[in-house]
């Protein structure tokens, strides 16, 4: 086992709205070790993006971390910093953001400012996080890093505006910005969703190569099970703000335990072997204000046990080494509950 | 529904070109053309699904719109079989075209912007029936309810408006609208790319089921190659407005012959972690400028096999001897196939 870099414990991020409370992230546990890639997968609205944003407290208003810890271990000799407790507007967190932990956003067109050159935007992070660096040196560093992420002709592109670059180039510039301060953790939120497959393959290869070279950890957030299969060593599956299953990538894809994970994998055309019809998950994700007494997935679950799954929250069971699942099918809990029902 | 098995294709496109003029200069003179669809020939048989794949900007959507004559192609033929006759859509008058268009329908990518928010489900699905068949009130309601049942929507939502539906349900409304006039050919332009994984399979199954029930032909445009592989009988690969390769799904997947198809297909990540580190053919990031296409083969600047002939002469689609119905536009296909 490697050294711990980030440990999320029982994180809850809620949005208190007039219409009700959205429990976007509702008690998740996750660890990221140094140098590894962890994937969070789930459908839209499952809370995966808010979970990632909570780490740096950059979730949109009025999102608030209401409970839990996000322990960040900058190095082995120092005590961890609990990022969840830091004031999002104060210096300590600002020094970490973009410097030690950086973020790649989904849409590089909207993440960049359209009225500044990409060079100026990347330089900014050098100038903010490294007080000794002058403008000239920052520009030189920017050109070096643009070159490193595979942008041809970086000496000229440094003065380009975002609209002058193609989608793939913009995403490379985004990665360059994220890497400018040699982060220990790179959070990539759907980094290739708006790109073509051929460009996606380039970006994924680039991320892998950069990780090998600089040894940073990557937390990759995606709805695409194939990208996680390609990149991650551990995966966590989220549904309605909660984890339903997590573990080693090979274990989860070979022996998925939770009915939701199984159904997601089975619904992929690429995994279906010449079947006439694809397997489907009935219904759709309920609206975010919904609160269920029982398991969040029970209404859509083919294997739901009546009187148990709709009455209680499942607790966690370890079905194999490091393979955790939140489901009554694997839990001893259900016997006790079943008796009560009778 | 009529079924005519004289071996002729339902739709046959010959040398279709759709160019958009680029106005430049003080007087706005046309100096250049964006060749969105450049000399594309293909066919779709009855009850068959043709998958069209390619990167964004390769002309897939323009091709679909050209078939509908929504965008007027500048050259070529669009031959559509209507009973015993074969009509060239390009030569029809506006009135004739309107009557033919009933048989060709589209399903759009974004179920949020393709439905009018001010119209109820009944009005959206019923509008084509009202205009073309003159159905009214009760008869219209009945037909709309039939269609809703067909696509798996609860008829009790008849009077609801699109905002009350989820993405998957909206796409079902779009499909019902497309089916309202009993079309023969449905052009589905990225019908699942705005949907979640768990909803995507529901819609794909629905499209398959409807195809069997109504003998539909599909042209299925998608950038998601695993979906195209699943749903298509034949596949056409487009690049910069040109058709690079076409053939039965089994011949194109898993590799194809054209160097572009190979690169494209190798780039699909597999949802099986045991297959990671399989060889990916990485293309460099050069984006083709559609107003200034490279000479010869449009793919040659990114092709790893390119030779002099590729820079000088444009390759035409030619049959591959070894497999039936498989055609490739590549000068070096014999050489590439050995690799």
Image: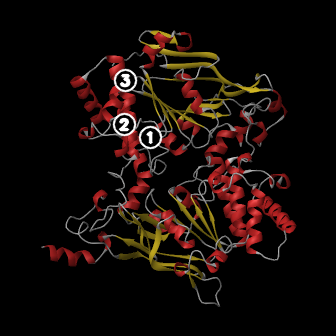
**SS at mark 3?**
helix
- Classify mark 2: residues with Cα within 10 Å, few (<14), some (14-19) or many (20+): many
According to the picture, the residue beneath numbered tag 3 turns out to be: B128
**SS at mark 1?**
loop
Q: Residue at x 75, y 56 (%)?
A: A118
- Where is residue B25? Give x, y as percent: 80, 26
**SS at mark 2?**
helix
Between marks 3 and 2, how big is the CA–CA gap? 13 Å
Q: Are marks 1 and 3 on the same chain?
A: yes
Pointer 3 with pointer 2, Cβ within 8 A: no
Q: Are marks 2 and 1 on the same chain?
A: yes
Pointer 2 with pointer 1, Cβ within 8 A: yes
According to the picture, the residue beneath numbered tag 2 turns out to be: B173
Q: Residue at x 44, y 13 (%)?
A: B82
Residue A68's place in the image compared with B118, above or below, is below
- Where is residue B233? Give x, y as percent: 49, 33
According to the picture, the residue beneath numbered tag 1 turns out to be: B111
Residue B278's place in the image compared with B251, above or below, is below
């Amino acid at each position: 086992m490697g050294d711990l870099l980030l440990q999320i414990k029982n994180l809850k991020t809620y949005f208190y709205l007039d219409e009700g409370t959205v429990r976007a992230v509702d008690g998740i546990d996750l660890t990221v070790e140094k140098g590894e890639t962890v994937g969070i997968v789930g459908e839209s609205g499952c809370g995966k993006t808010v979970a990632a944003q909570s780490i740096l407290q950059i979730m949109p208003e009025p999102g608030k971390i209401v409970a839990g810890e996000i322990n960040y271990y900058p190095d082995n000799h120092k005590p961890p910093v609990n990022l969840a407790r830091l004031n999002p507007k104060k210096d300590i967190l600002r020094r970490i953001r973009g410097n030690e932990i950086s973020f790649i956003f989904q849409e590089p067109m909207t993440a960049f400012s359209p009225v500044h050159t990409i060079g100026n935007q990347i330089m900014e992070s050098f100038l903010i996080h490294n007080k000794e660096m002058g403008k000239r040196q920052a520009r030189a560093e920017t050109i070096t890093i643009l070159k490193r992420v595979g942008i041809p002709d970086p000496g000229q592109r440094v003065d380009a505006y975002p609209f002058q670059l193609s989608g793939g180039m913009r995403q490379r510039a985004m990665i360059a910005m994220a890497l400018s301060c040699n982060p220990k953790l790179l959070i990539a939120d759907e980094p290739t969703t708006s790109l073509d497959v051929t460009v996606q393959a380039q970006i994924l290869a680039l991320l892998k190569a950069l990780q090998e070279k600089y040894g940073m950890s990557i937390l990759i957030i995606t709805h695409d099970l194939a990208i996680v299969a390609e990149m991650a060593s551990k995966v966590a599956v989220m549904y309605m703000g909660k984890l339903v299953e997590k573990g080693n990538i090979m274990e989860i894809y070979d022996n998925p335990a939770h009915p939701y994970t199984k159904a997601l994998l089975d619904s992929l055309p690429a995994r279906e072997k010449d079947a006439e019809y694809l397997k489907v998950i009935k219904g759709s994700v309920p609206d975010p204000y919904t609160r269920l007494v029982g398991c969040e997935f029970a209404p859509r679950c083919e294997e739901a046990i009546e009187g148990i799954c709709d009455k209680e929250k499942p607790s966690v069971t370890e079905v194999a080494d490091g393979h955790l699942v939140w489901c009554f099918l694997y839990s001893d809990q259900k016997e006790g509950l079943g008796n009560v029902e009778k | 529904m009529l079924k005519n098995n004289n071996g002729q294709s339902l739709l046959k496109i010959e040398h279709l070109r759709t160019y958009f003029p680029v106005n430049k200069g003080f007087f706005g003179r046309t100096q250049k053309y964006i060749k969105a669809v450049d000399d594309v020939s293909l066919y779709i048989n009855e009850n068959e699904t043709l998958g069209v794949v390619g990167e964004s900007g390769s002309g897939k959507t323009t091709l679909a719109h050209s078939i509908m004559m929504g965008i007027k192609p500048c050259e070529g033929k669009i031959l559509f079989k209507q009973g015993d006759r074969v009509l060239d859509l390009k030569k029809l008058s506006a009135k004739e075209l309107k009557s033919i268009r009933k048989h060709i329908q589209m399903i759009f990518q974004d179920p949020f912007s393709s439905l009018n928010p001010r119209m109820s489900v009944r009005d959206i699905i019923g509008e084509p029936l009202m205009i073309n068949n003159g159905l009214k009130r009760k008869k219209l309601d009945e037909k709309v309810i039939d269609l809703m049942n067909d696509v798996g929507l609860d008829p009790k939502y008849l009077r609801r408006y699109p905002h009350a539906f989820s993405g998957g349900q909206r796409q079902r409304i779009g499909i019902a609208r497309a089916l309202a006039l009993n079309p023969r050919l449905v052009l589905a332009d990225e019908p699942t790319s705005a949907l979640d994984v768990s909803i995507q399979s529901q819609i794909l199954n629905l499209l398959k089921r409807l195809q069997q029930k109504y003998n539909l032909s599909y042209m299925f445009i998608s950038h998601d190659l695993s979906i195209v592989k699943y749903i298509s009988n034949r596949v056409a690969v487009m690049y910069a407005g040109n058709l690079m390769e076409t053939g039965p799904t089994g011949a194109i997947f898993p590799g194809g012959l054209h160097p572009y198809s190979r690169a494209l297909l190798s780039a699909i990540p597999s949802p099986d972690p045991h297959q990671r580190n399989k060889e990916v053919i990485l293309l460099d990031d050069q984006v083709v400028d559609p107003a200034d296409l490279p000479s010869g083969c449009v793919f040659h600047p990114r092709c790893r096999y390119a030779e002099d002939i590729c820079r000088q002469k444009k390759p035409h689609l030619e049959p591959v001897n070894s497999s039936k119905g498989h055609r490739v536009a590549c000068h070096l296909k014999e050489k590439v196939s050995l690799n």
